[in-house]
Image (spheres, grey):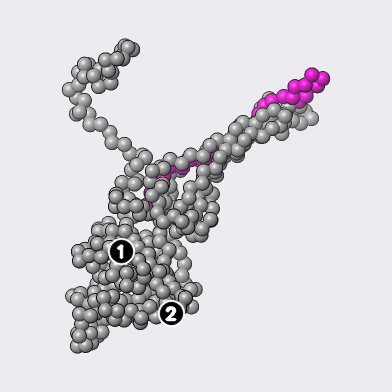
Amino acid sequence: MADSNFIDYVKILCRSGKGGAGSRHYHRAKYIPKGGPDGGDGGRGGHIILKGNRNMWTLLPLRFTRHVFATDGQSGGENRSTGKDGEDRIIEVPVGTAVFDAETGQFLAEITEDGEEIKLLRGGKGGLGNWHFATSTNRAPRYAQPGQPAIEKAVILELKLLGDVGLVGFPNAGKSTLLSSLSAAKPKIADYPFTTMEPSLGIVNYRGDKSFVMADIPGIIEGASEGKGLGLRFLRHIERNAVLLFMVPADSDDIKKDYEVLLREVKEFNPELADKSRVLAITKSDLLDDELREALEAELPEGIPTVFISAVTGQGLTELKDLLWREINSEENQNNFTMTHRNLDVRHRVEEEDNFIFQQEEPDEDDFANFTDEDWEDEFWDEETTVNPD
């Protein structure tokens, strides 16, 4: 994934601006010997703001902007003049981005619409100038409020694709082939496992001007919820889907068992995914004759709509689209569908992204055990240095 432009997980360090201090100035004029306090208020610090941008599809720009700092507010001035506010920093992210606290893993916010803005970190308020504290008994206060401090927080941004249908299956179950057959998407297709290395979206046309969005993720394997394979990193993308399409190939040794394994991995990743509508598609059905199909129908899991399809020959694709459209628009699905985010735990984090700020490789003490004074001088001082290192 290091060479891919699709980045769906990034950790950044944000800091809002601190508020400017209030002024302790006193009015001075030629013919006003006791002008009194006129110190102005300090300006507020800059905010850190997240903004949705529908033209973005990846978090790649933030991978090279790991520190986002707003500017501080300026101090107040004379004649009750207020200091300049700090400049806000607006972080543009793709629609579908969720924000988590990097320390605790707690879910903080999400961006679901283009142009939506969320104030992630609030800038510090500016302090009040001394003129606010003047009273009948204290006409010349020599104090003013300091500005509020800045807020610093490391956050994790996690992109989750927005799709109506999410494809779930083992590697080489035919997910990418189905997506390419039903839409104009062109995912990579090959005859070896884990061909799909990043999620893909496709728009499926349905009866006239209707359409729905289908999302393909890399194949998952048993134990994916514990960190095995690529599935764990991409299971987050099906959290936003209204319907989950489980895909099991017809040449599987046990279709029911494979479906139960896939369902268990999805539930262990996020238990609330079990409440989503589910459809089962038996792929590569062109390999079956009537007798084998009847035998498989008797062993299918109960309680889930099932359809036999072949993305190569087109068998069952119309029936599949009809079934998916009914599930997407069913009254039960519309009423029960809610977008829920599980808090991040150790298994759901990307180690190489998490360690970019806070962990630095310490030098091995053995590397310097045999260093002499001359070695140290050669290491840190060149011949042109005129300052005595001692």
User: Which secondary structure, mark 1?
Assistant: loop
Tell me which secondary structure the magenta stretch mostly adopts. Answer: loop
User: Which secondary structure, mark 2?
Assistant: loop
Residue shown at 20%/82% (left/top)? Answer: 288
Instruction: Name the image quarter holding residue 6.
Output: bottom left
Looking at the picture, how far across and down is residue 365, in whole percent?
A: 22, 29
Residue shown at 29%/81% (left/top)? Answer: 315
Looking at the picture, how far across and down is residue 385, in whole percent?
A: 31, 14
Give whichever of 137, 93 is nearer the camera: 93
Instruction: Name the image quarter holding residue 29.
Output: top right
Residue 252 within the magenta-colored segment of the rendering: no
Looking at the picture, how far across and down is residue 154, in whole percent?
A: 43, 44
The amino acid on which the numbered mark 1 sits, given as a three-letter code, is Pro
| Number of residues whose C-alpha sits closer than 10 Å to that of mark 2, classed few (under 14), some (14–19) or many (20 or more) | few
Q: CA distance from mark 2 to mark 1?
A: 24 Å
- Stretch of the chain drawn in magenta: 9-36
Q: Which residue is mark 1?
A: 187
Task: From this view, report whether residue 122 is shown above or below residue 76.
Answer: below
Q: Which residue is mark 2?
A: 207
Q: Earlier in the sequence, mark 2 or mark 1?
A: 1
Residue 12 within the magenta-colored segment of the rendering: yes
The amino acid on which the numbered mark 2 sits, given as a three-letter code, is Arg
As drawn, the label of residue 52 is: none
Give whichever of 68, 224 is nearer the camera: 68
Instruction: Name the image quarter holding residue 339.
Output: bottom left
The answer to whether residue 92 of the structure is visible from this angle is: yes
| Number of residues whose C-alpha sits closer than 10 Å to that of mark 1, classed few (under 14), some (14–19) or many (20 or more) | many
Residue shown at 17%/22% (left/top)? Answer: 370
Residue shown at 31%/52% (left/top)? Answer: 4
Looking at the picture, how far across and down is residue 338, in whole percent?
A: 47, 67
The C terminus lies in quadrant: top left
